[in-house]
């Protein structure tokens, strides 16, 4: 009888233990539940404070540095532009004696590029020629094909054909390279003054001396021929250009179209 009572009491205690879980089992269940819940999920990246602001500041700093570099690159150009402008004003509004005195006191390295820039600013023709000769006397300076061609253009534009020819002759006498640009300028100004035959002779001289025409030269010469009713010669020049491997450009086609429209 006593044994049966003990057995019943032990079963009752087991029943109670099943109803009320032990204190240690609850945290374990929670831990397992937490692991099952978060298993396989990627870890979140640590938050970097002010990260977006930092990137924005870096971009602004890079842009500022680029602007400063561009400004430094532009400074020499701006300086030269201002210097050329002052020289132009001096040549235009001052007497040559005053201009020469100021030129001698300018702390500037007189090279071909600078002299050519002054000439291309289109000072008065007489002053340009005086400046050209003044530059010839500078120590260590020599005129080249660029300064000669620009001076030649100044005379040609003013209709001073004899002076233009003089510059061209001096250029050849001094052994300075005469390229297609110079020959094209000569042809243009000769034909503009009515000397079409001389322009045609200049074309033949250019080829005879081994100076190969460019697409600019071909196009300019064709225009001269078309404008002076020399259609056969212009057509021959166009065929010569194609056969020599020089490709026409937009200006070439414009010259051809203008001729076709004008001829009806």
Image (cartoon, grey):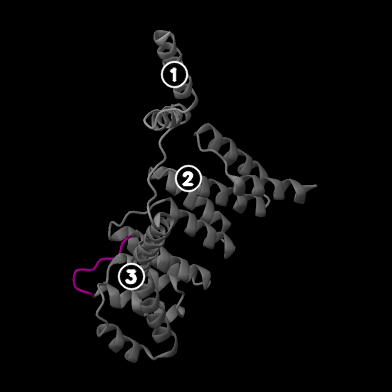
Q: Residue at x 43, y 55 (%)?
A: 52
Residue 228 appears in view: no
Disc 3, SS = helix
Q: Which residue is mark 2?
A: 214
How far apart, in angstroms, are the residues tagged by discs 1 and 3?
98 Å
Q: Is residue 102 left or right of residue 150?
A: left
x and y, in percent, of residue 188 in the image: 54, 59
- Say few, some or many: other residues with alpha carbon within 10 Å of mark 3 (under 14 / 14 to 19 / 20 or more): few
Q: Earlier in the sequence, mark 1 or mark 3?
A: 1
Start and end of the magenta stretch? 138-144
Q: Residue at x 35, y 78 (%)?
A: 131
Q: Looking at the image, is mark 1 or mark 2 nearer the viewer?
A: 1
Q: Is residue 140 magenta?
A: yes
Q: Is residue 136 left or right of residue 15?
A: left
Quadrant of the drawing holding the N terminus: top left
Residue 56 appears in view: yes
Q: Which residue is mark 1?
A: 14
- Say few, some or many: other residues with alpha carbon within 10 Å of mark 1 (under 14 / 14 to 19 / 20 or more): few
- Judge whether 40 appears above or below 212 on screen: above
The image's mark for residue 192 is none
Extreme residue in the front direction: 1
How far apart, in angstroms, are the residues tagged by discs 2 and 3?
33 Å
x and y, in percent, of residue 242 in the image: 55, 35
Q: Residue at x 80, y 47 (%)?
A: 264
**CB atoms at circles 1 and 2 under 8 Å apart?**
no
Q: Earlier in the sequence, mark 2 or mark 3?
A: 3
Q: Which residue is mark 3?
A: 76
x and y, in percent, of residue 204 in the image: 47, 46
- Judge whether 207 appears above or below 99 on screen: above
């Amino acid at each position: 009888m006593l044994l049966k009572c003990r057995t019943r009491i032990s079963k009752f205690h087991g029943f109670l233990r099943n109803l009320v879980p032990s204190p240690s089992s609850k945290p374990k269940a929670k831990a397992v539940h937490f692991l099952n819940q978060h298993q396989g999920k990627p870890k979140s990246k640590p938050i970097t404070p002010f990260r977006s602001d930092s990137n924005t500041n870096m971009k602004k700093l890079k842009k500022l540095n680029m602007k400063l570099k561009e400004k430094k690159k532009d400074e020499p150009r701006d300086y030269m532009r201002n210097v050329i402008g002052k020289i132009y004003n001096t040549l235009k509004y001052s007497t040559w004696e005053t201009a020469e005195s100021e030129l001698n006191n300018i702390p500037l390295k007189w090279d071909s590029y600078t002299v050519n820039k002054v000439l291309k600013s289109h000072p008065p023709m007489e002053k340009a020629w005086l400046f050209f000769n003044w530059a010839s006397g500078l120590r260590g300076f020599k005129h080249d094909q660029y300064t000669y061609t620009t001076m030649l253009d100044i005379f040609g534009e003013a209709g001073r054909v004899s002076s233009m020819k003089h510059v061209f002759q001096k250029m050849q006498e001094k052994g300075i390279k005469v390229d297609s640009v110079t020959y094209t300028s000569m042809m243009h100004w000769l034909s503009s003054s009515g000397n079409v035959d001389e322009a045609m002779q200049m074309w033949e001289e250019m080829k005879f001396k081994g100076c190969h025409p460019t697409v600019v030269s071909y196009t300019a010469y064709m225009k001269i021929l078309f404008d002076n009713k020399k259609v056969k010669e212009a057509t021959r020049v166009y065929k010569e250009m194609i056969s020599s491997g020089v490709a026409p450009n937009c200006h070439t086609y414009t010259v051809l179209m203008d001729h076709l429209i004008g001829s009806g």
